[in-house]
Amino acid sequence: MTIKIKYSVSITICLFFVLLGYCQTDSLKQSDSLNTSLLKEYDNKLKLIEQQRIRDSIKKSELELQLSQLKTTDNLKKEELQNQLQEISNKEKKRIAEKKAKIDSLRVSAKSFHVIGFFNDTLFPIYNKLGSFTAHDRALAISKRIKKLKNDYSFSYKTLKVVEAESTFDIVYGESIIMSISENDALWNNTSKKNLAEKYCKIVTDAVLKYKQETNLTTLLKEISLALLVLTILVILLYFVGKLFKWTKDIIKTQEGKRINGLKIRDYTLLDSSKQVVFFTSLNTILKWIIIIILIYIALPIIFGFFPWTQTFAQTLFGYIFNPLKKIGSGLWNYLPNLFTIIVIFFVFRYALKGIHFLKNEIEQGKLHLSGFYPDWANPTFQIIRVILYAFMFVLIFPYLPGSDSPIFQGVSVFLGFLFTFGSAGSLSNIMAGIILTYMRLFKIGDRVKIGDVVGDVIEKSLLVTRVRTIKNEIISIPNSTVMSNHTTNYSNEAEMGSGLIIHSTITIGYDIPWKDIHQALVNAAGRTDLLLKNPKPFVLQTSLDDFYISYQINAYTKDANKQATIYSQLHQNIQDCCNEVGIEILSPHYRAARDGNMITIPAKYLNKDYKAPSFNIKIDKEEKK
């Protein structure tokens, strides 16, 4: 068991190093290219400054030599040489100040290349080139030289030394130079060459000694023991987690039909008891695996943290959890001012809408009267104002939403607006027509109307359609734009508000019947009809005098516009009865009757008991016969 675990750990570590080395090399190459581009201008100027430094250095050496050879009595020449040396010293200070200013300007944008230690940890950065080595090449070369030091079993704090060279301070290991610290290195780190060399020497020494300490046999055995202990604890925890969730699964199954009786929404059964058990057991399984994954995820960084080669990997794994949580917490904290602003805006508009809603109810109930404003306008006006206020509230809140200034957020907003505009072009025309119809007050719910060829009672008015129920109980939905483009007849408006709706019907009677008798019969028929008003009184109009008949129109008032079919049916029945009672025949326009030998068209129950059909009349012309 131990051999397998060691073998597995070794393979994991090797794979990790290979992957990390590849990523590091690729990253260094990309960063080196960027850094070279950023420092190109600086390097060109640095060459000129370096050439000037060399010339000044040679001249300074010559002046110092001449000064040392002068006699003590030659004060004038000595003063002249000292002045020249001071001038060179001032130029040197000016040169260094210019280089430092240029480096400070590049410090934000320039990329550094890290010297990597034994455990893939960063020891220190390299910013600039040295000789023919770029910053990237220097970092790689120094990293390789440091890693060779692990083979020296006698390595100690006194093994590495700092040696001053002509223009650099070198960190020396025996006869080999680990790295050279130039003036540019010191300027990039805001210190002197000697201090920087001593600092880097201590860092390298500590890294080597730490490696030796972490990789000795005693430490490795301790680390492996701790890793095995954590693995044992993990296995025990996973075993008990499995047992716990198996127990909860059995409990869920035993509760079927007891505490688990299904889920119902009113009369609809969303989940019966068996399906609900399946749902809870599935949820139990998902929760079990979530806990198992969390335990493994926590255990792996702990195990990796025991070994120095994988400590960075452990930090990375923990970072996958803690870094997002840290960003979320930081984002929420930084977003609090905007969140409070949004809350204030929301409550201001919320209470403004409550005040407008109160006014709407007062107008709708007739408690508040506004000149020229009808109560049935209250609700649609409130809906329009609410939409406008919500839109204005969204405009105010939008800049405070997280990510509102990002191009993706703005692009999605434009795309949704585009879809809404072009996808709802027809709907928008119906909505505008619905708003106009509301304020035109053409009809209301329950009115008997005629829209185009459709006659019926209005049962629904919305922003998009008007629904009408015909006398045959047919529900017809008419788009509001169609209502606007057709003429509309409202039968109920005058019936409710005025003297009443006039019901009228026309019959045709021949010229042989006196018109007064027809008028009286029609008025009597209207008087017998239940839903027709007695006052105003019914009246008769003679609408035309045709070739064979006269058109008589009976007109009567009613308040029940929604019952026209019943009223017309009963009125027509009464017209037949009243005409038959007074002996008036209602003949079709082209009906021709030969009375000789034929029965009258009036039903028999309205005739006298001794009525007989007349006999045929024959007239003979005697003169013709002769």
Image (spheres, grey):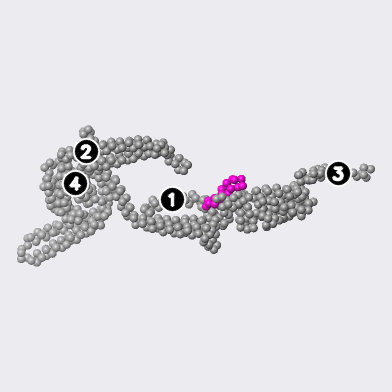
Which residue corresponds to mark 2? 229
Lateral position of residue 230 relative to residue 396, left or right: left
Q: Which residues are magenta?
A: 461-478
- Residue underneath mark 1: 415
> Which quarter of the figure is the C terminus placed in?
top right
Residue 493 quadrant? bottom right
Residue 430, disc: none
First in sequence: mark 1 or mark 3?
A: 1
Query: From what the image shows, is residue 249 above or below residue 66?
Result: above
Number of other residues with Cα within 10 Å of mark 4, as a class: few under 14, some 14 to 19, many 20 or more: some
| Disc 1/disc 4 C-alpha distance (Å) | 54 Å
The percent position of residue 259, horizontal first and vertical second, equals 39, 39
Instruction: Say what secondary structure mark 1 lies in.
Output: helix
Determine the residue positioned at 5% across, 64% down: 72
Q: Amino acid at mark 4?
A: Ile
- Disc 2 vs disc 1: which is toward the camera? 2
Label 2 sits on what residue type? Answer: Leu
- Residue 341: which quarter of the image? bottom left
Q: Secondary structure at mark 4?
A: helix
CA gap between label 2 and label 1 equals 57 Å
Quick one: SS at disc 2?
A: helix
Quadrant location of the N terminus? top left
Disc 1 crowd, CA 10 A, few/some/many (<14, 14-19, 20+): few
Label located before the other in sequence (2 or 1): 2
The amino acid on which the numbered mark 1 sits, given as a three-letter code, is Phe
